[in-house]
Amino acid sequence: MYTGHLTTDLNLNALWMSWNIFLGCIPFLLAWHLFQPGRKISFFWTLGLVFFILFLPNAPYIFTDVIHFREQLEVITRRRDLVLATAQYLIFLAIGYMLFVESYRRFEKFILGKRYYQHRYIVRLTTFATVSFGVWLGRVLRFNSWDLFVHPQRILLTTRFLNDLPVITFILAFTCFLMLGYFAYESVCGYFEEKV
């Protein structure tokens, strides 16, 4: 996949990174539209929520693309190339992180409000585990969010993998990763809110 030529490899990264960022922007834009204060729930809102849940795994999926960085390291021979490639991946991961936490923050705030805020950890655990399974479907089985409509039977058949230990391990580990990542985001936001 990688040539060892810095410009070529960075441009190659930019192509697939741009596509994955685009997919990660979909739940972010849906969250911005669907979960505004005072938004009334309707049939189209519910349809939008379904699409939001389907596309939400695309944002944290970006974290799993770090496997390509490992591949690129095998052909990097100069320190300057290593610095530039590392910077490109860090920016890419940071964008994915912000897209996910902001998308979920708007969802949680709208769904729970102040009345049910005490149940936030149950909602997070359920949502993040579902998202983790979605990430696994994309990373391992190479499914896309729209495959639920294009190949619904194939998607439903994947539930049999939920009995497999490697799949369970991935879901648990990635769920914990998302929980910690969101907790860090919440803590930083809370710190700055107190300062303001």
Image (spheres, rainbow, N blue to C red):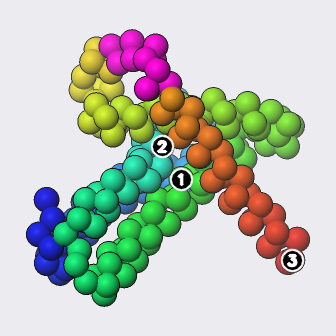
Disc 2 or 1, which lies upstream in sequence? 2
Vertical comparison of 88 with 78: above or below: above
Label 2, secondary structure: give it: loop
Q: Position of residue 137 (x, y in %)?
A: 36, 32
Disc 3 or 1, which lies upstream in sequence? 1
Nearest the camera: 81 or 116?
81
Q: Look at mark 3 in the image and give the residue it sits on.
A: 195
Q: Amino acid at mark 3?
A: Lys
> Mark 1 packing: few (<14 Cα in 10 Å), some, or many (20+)?
many
| Quadrant for the N terminus in the image | bottom left
> Mark 2 packing: few (<14 Cα in 10 Å), some, or many (20+)?
many
Vertical comparison of 28 with 176: above or below: below
Q: Amino acid at mark 2?
A: Leu
Vertical comparison of 102 with 195: above or below: above
Q: Position of residue 94 (x, y in %)?
A: 50, 66
Q: Look at mark 2 in the image and give the residue it sits on.
A: 56
Image-based side of 60 in relation to 108, left or right: left
| Residue stretch in magenta | 156-168
Q: Look at mark 1 in the image and give the residue it sits on.
A: 100
Vertical comparison of 120 with 153: above or below: below
